[in-house]
Image (tube, rainbow, N blue to C red):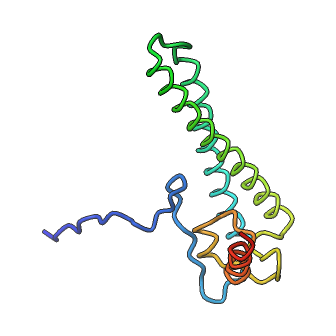
């Protein structure tokens, strides 16, 4: 009997909804229809995960007793709620960036740097699907930010 190969865990899975990263073929045109569909799927899946988190928080907040009698419990509860709300606010802002990225796919601008117009690159977009700048422009942006701050 032939020996069975042990299945290896696929470490190349994107953190977003288990979608495998896009692997560009040699000579393939950048941001072709296949790539656009891949990144559209990644962005919609990510948006769905964030919306689920927000809905979970809303349900959790409804279930929490309004005023615990113990002042320490109340203070702890208020701190937890404040942190949770800040996280959800960041997620809402991220959803807005995801929607903007989907709009860029629809207009054909996705994957190209907003500043210099060069290709951002599939690998960078896999790491940060909402990226609007190529790595060089982003680096310059961060240097300027440090000098101002």
- Figure quadrant of the N terminus: bottom left
Q: Which residue is located at x 83 percent, y 78 percent?
A: 115
Task: Tell me what residue is drawn at x 20 percent, y 67 percent.
Answer: 4
Coordinates of residue 24 in the picture (x, y in percent): 60, 79
Q: Quadrant of residue 49?
A: top right
Find residue 117 and report its image quarter: bottom right
Quadrant of residue 72 within the rendered picture: top left
Query: Which residue in the rendered view is the most extreme toward the bottom?
Result: 27
Residue at image point 77% right, 69% down: 110
**Residue at horizontal 71%, vertical 77%?**
147
- 48 w.r.t. 129: above or below: above
Q: Position of residue 78 (x, y in %)?
A: 55, 27
Looking at the image, is 9 positioned above or below residue 123? Answer: above
Quadrant for the C terminus in the image: bottom right
Furthest-left residue in view? 1
Rendering coords of residue 91 (x, y %): 65, 46
Q: Report the number of discs.
A: 0
């Amino acid at each position: 009997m032939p020996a069975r190969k042990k299945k290896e865990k696929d470490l190349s899975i994107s953190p977003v909804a288990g979608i495998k990263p896009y692997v560009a073929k040699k000579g393939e045109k950048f941001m072709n229809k296949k790539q656009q569909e891949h990144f559209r799927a990644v962005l919609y899946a990510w948006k769905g995960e964030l919306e689920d988190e927000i809905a979970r928080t809303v349900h959790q907040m409804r279930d929490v007793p309004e005023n615990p009698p113990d002042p320490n419990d109340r203070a702890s509860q208020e701190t937890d709620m404040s942190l949770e709300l800040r996280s959800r606010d960041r997620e809402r802002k991220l959803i807005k960036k995801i929607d903007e990225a989907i709009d860029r796919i629809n207009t054909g601008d996705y994957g190209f740097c907003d500043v210099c117009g060069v290709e951002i690159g599939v690998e960078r977009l896999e790491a940060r699907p909402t990226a609007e700048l190529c790595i060089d422009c982003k680096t310059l942006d961060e240097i300027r930010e440090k000098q101002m701050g």
